[in-house]
Image (cartoon, rainbow, N blue to C red):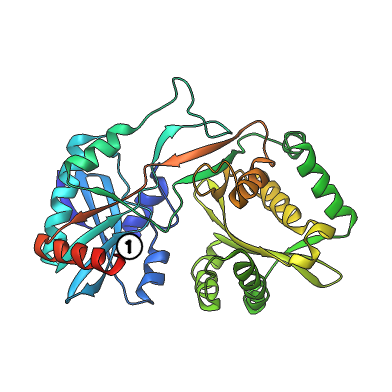
């Protein structure tokens, strides 16, 4: 095995074919991070001349001149392969030490256990606990993440629009038809129209108490991914009245729902949020994406407002929709004196 540095194009080719691929592990996201003060690196493990593991890694000075290292949506390797995992992280640790790093955060797009539509574990389903065990043996500890641990996804392979329509929950189907009868149409926003999306997401974030992205983020994502056909900003409207807007990634074999908002005063009358989801689901199926990822459901809520979010997403697939549980986020102390000092200060800050 050889631990090697990679060119961005080499990494992108490997990432595109990886079963653990994520749009977060792309040179485009590295450029986005770079615009915000991070330095990107591309590293991998070669076995008999073939690349078997790789990661896009970014670093930024954050604590007494030492740097935080992060692999957003990665690394890309079989974490259940003990030999490969041990070699990869042993050499990655050395590399980070040599580049003045004191901590490594990882956030793999790696499933843990198989779950059904209601979030229950599937009997005799897969279980990738060995991936977590291998991370623990390499010194990693679970940590909080800005990325969701639980997702709701739809399998789209070989499903026609008629089949998708039949598999909608009755209420969801009725909401979609109501939107159509009300004259709601969905179209793609161009770059100059992104402030329309921003206005809607900002008002939604205030109403539902979450942090919205700045307009510059949406513009940067548009610039990085639009010409590659890997991002869509959609608007649902009627008579030129903006009703709902959303951002979707189209990467690899899945379409991913990331951000959205709706004008509260029109939600019940027009059901535009249903129209915009139905539009992208049909688009993804027509363009041969294997699955549609509704993204986070914030765990498996049983009561409160989050139940509504989960139920909304479940309503679009009564047959093949299911919960995906990821292994979560982890951190590794690289420079122990600095790492321990940072941990102590963090505890004092929150005490």
Residue 100 at x, y = what percent? 14, 69
Please, what secondary structure does the residue beneath circle 1 have?
A: helix
User: What residue is shown at x 72% (from left), y 49% (from top)?
Assistant: 278
Residue 201 at x, y = what percent? 63, 69
Quadrant assignment, res 337: bottom left
Quadrant assignment, res 23: bottom left
Quadrant assignment, res 68: bottom left
Residue 260 at x, y = what percent? 63, 62
Q: Is residue 224 above or below residue 152?
A: below
Asked if residue 81 lies left or right of residue 222, the reply is left
At label 1, counting other C-alpha atoms closer than 10 Å, the crowd grade (few under 14, some 14-19, many 20 or more) is: some
Q: Quadrant of the N terminus?
A: top left
Return the residue at label 1: 8
Asked if residue 301 lies left or right of residue 45, the reply is right
User: What residue is shown at x 72% (from left), y 57% (from top)?
Assistant: 273
Q: Is residue 125 above or below residue 166?
A: above
Q: Quadrant of the C terminus?
A: bottom left
Kindly give the residue lying farthest to the front in the view shown.
351
């Amino acid at each position: 095995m050889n631990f090697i540095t990679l060119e961005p194009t080499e990494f992108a080719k490997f990432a595109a074919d990886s079963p653990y691929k994520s749009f977060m592990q792309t040179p485009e996201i590295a450029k986005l991070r770079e615009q915000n003060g991070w330095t990107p690196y591309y590293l991998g493990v070669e076995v008999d001349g073939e690349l078997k593991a790789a990661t896009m890694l970014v670093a930024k000075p954050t604590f007494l001149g030492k740097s935080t290292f992060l692999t957003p949506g990665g690394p890309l390797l079989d974490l259940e392969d003990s030999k490969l995992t041990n070699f990869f992280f042993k050499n990655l640790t050395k590399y980070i030490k040599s580049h003045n790093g004191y901590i490594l955060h990882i956030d793999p797009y790696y499933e843990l256990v198989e779950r059904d539509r209601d979030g229950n574990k599937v009997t005799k389903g897969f279980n990738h606990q060995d991936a977590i065990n291998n991370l623990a043996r390499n010194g990693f500890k679970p940590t909080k993440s800005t990325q969701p641990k639980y997702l709701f996804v739809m399998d789209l392979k070989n499903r026609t629009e008629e089949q998708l329509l039949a598999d909608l929950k009755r209420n969801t189907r009725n909401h979609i038809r109501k939107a159509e009868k009300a004259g709601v149409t969905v179209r793609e926003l161009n770059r100059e129209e992104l402030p329309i999306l921003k206005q809607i997401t900002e008002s939604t974030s205030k109403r539902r108490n979450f942090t919205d992205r700045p307009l510059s983020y949406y513009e940067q994502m548009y610039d990085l991914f639009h010409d590659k056909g890997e991002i869509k900003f959609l608007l649902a409207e009627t008579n030129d009245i903006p009703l709902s807007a959303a951002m979707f990634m189209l990467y690899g074999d899945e379409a991913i729902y990331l951000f959205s908002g709706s004008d509260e005063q029109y939600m019940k009358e027009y059901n535009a949020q249903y129209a915009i989801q139905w539009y992208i689901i049909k688009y993804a199926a027509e363009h041969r994406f294997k699955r549609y990822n509704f993204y986070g459901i914030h765990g498996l809520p049983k009561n409160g407002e989050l139940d509504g979010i989960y139920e909304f997403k479940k309503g679009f697939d009564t047959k093949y929709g299911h919960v995906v549980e990821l292994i979560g986020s982890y951190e590794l102390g690289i420079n122990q004196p600095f790492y321990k000092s940072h941990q102590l200060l963090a505890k004092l800050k929150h005490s």
